Image (cartoon, grey):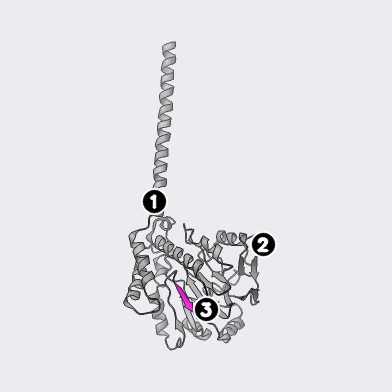
Amino acid sequence: MVVCFDSFLKKLLCAKLNIMKRYLNNLIILGLFGLFLAVSYLYIPPSATKLNQQINQSPLLSSDIDRINAVIEYGAYLADSLPENVPKLYFYWISKQRKLSDLRIRRAVGDIKKSQITPNELKIWSLLNMGVVIKTTNHTIAVDTANLPFSNAHNELVRNVDIFLITHMDNDHYDPALLKKALAQNKTVIVPENFFFDNNKPDNLINAPYGKAINIGTTTITAYQTDHRGDGNFNNPNAWYVIESDGFKLLHTGDGRTFKDKEVEKKLNGMKDFDILLANFQIHPFNIRDLNPKTVIPLHLYKFMSGKDLYQESTIETVQNTYQRYNKDLEGIKKVYLLPCESYDYR
């Protein structure tokens, strides 16, 4: 009986040891996998660092060979190994495109934080897609600054921006987590009429009635209703924004293209006093001609998060060629081509 009991204990002990061994092996495997994910996320390839530095050193608004090369190499870098359609989620974790974009956003946000703007000066940063930050003497305004997947780069904006505008609900324009942080820090968030995302309805969340000016300090914001990329659907909230701040007047188009009220289009075209048009690259040159801004900055460039198909339509070279074909119509309008996360000083 004693021998049998000892044998049973030995078997029980061996079974427990085997379970613990398997458990330990699983923990080691999970730990190694977690380490792999952390390294793959944090590792910045030297090619991204080098290209980022090259872009930063290239002379903006020139046809200098260094600038031309920087634009070409940036385009080729983002196009490399890009899938035809929207990339799978893991692509945003490990891709060099995401890592280069993250480097550039972090630099831009740091620049936004430290830049001091003098009277009669305006500075604009192009972030990703239609995202921009506009800084005047008294206000810092962000439009459509949605987060890059698996990145916290935009979160620093909350501390440095006092007005956030959202044109519509596409996730490359709208980040509810970011906006809730902004609301919690008592920043003003403006969305189009009938656009809802926070059931608490805080006082600093403003649903902008179409066509009615909203005054915030020395800034006036007016939203105008549009569809989305010419789809003719006016049921979903979508807007162009006229932004008047500290003596400057800008127009941001989001992804809007067609107006529900044709009188609105006539009204905007009749203003003829826009300092800067922040235009989706798909806005036709005839529309730019009719608005007649002093300066146009095409946005939604290098759409690598949408796959190669849309990406190829959105490079600076493609937009330059389009504008060149309508050169007579755009005569007298300054064209400013910014790589994502570059800035432009306007005086």
Image coords of residue 114 (percent x, y): 49, 67
Q: Is residue 255 above or below residue 37?
A: below
Count residues near mark 1 (Cα–Cα under 10 Å), then give few for <14, some for 14-19, many for 20+.
few
Q: Which residue is mark 1?
A: 39
- Nearer the observer, 199 or 104: 104
Dot 3 or dot 1, earlier in sequence:
1
Dot 2 or dot 3, earlier in sequence:
3
Image coords of residue 340 (percent x, y): 43, 69
Q: In the image, what residue type sits under mark 2?
A: Pro
Q: CA distance from mark 2 to mark 1?
A: 40 Å
Q: Which residue is mark 3?
A: 121
Count residues near mark 2 (Cα–Cα under 10 Å), then give few for <14, some for 14-19, many for 20+.
few
Q: In the image, what residue type sits under mark 1?
A: Val
Q: What secondary structure is marked by label 1?
A: helix
Image coords of residue 144 (percent x, y): 53, 68
Image coords of residue 41 (percent x, y): 41, 54
The quarter in which the N terminus is drawn is top left
Q: Nearer the viewer, mark 2 or mark 3?
A: 3
- Nearer the observer, 332 or 159: 159
Q: Is residue 279 above or below residue 292?
A: above
Q: Which residue is mark 2?
A: 202
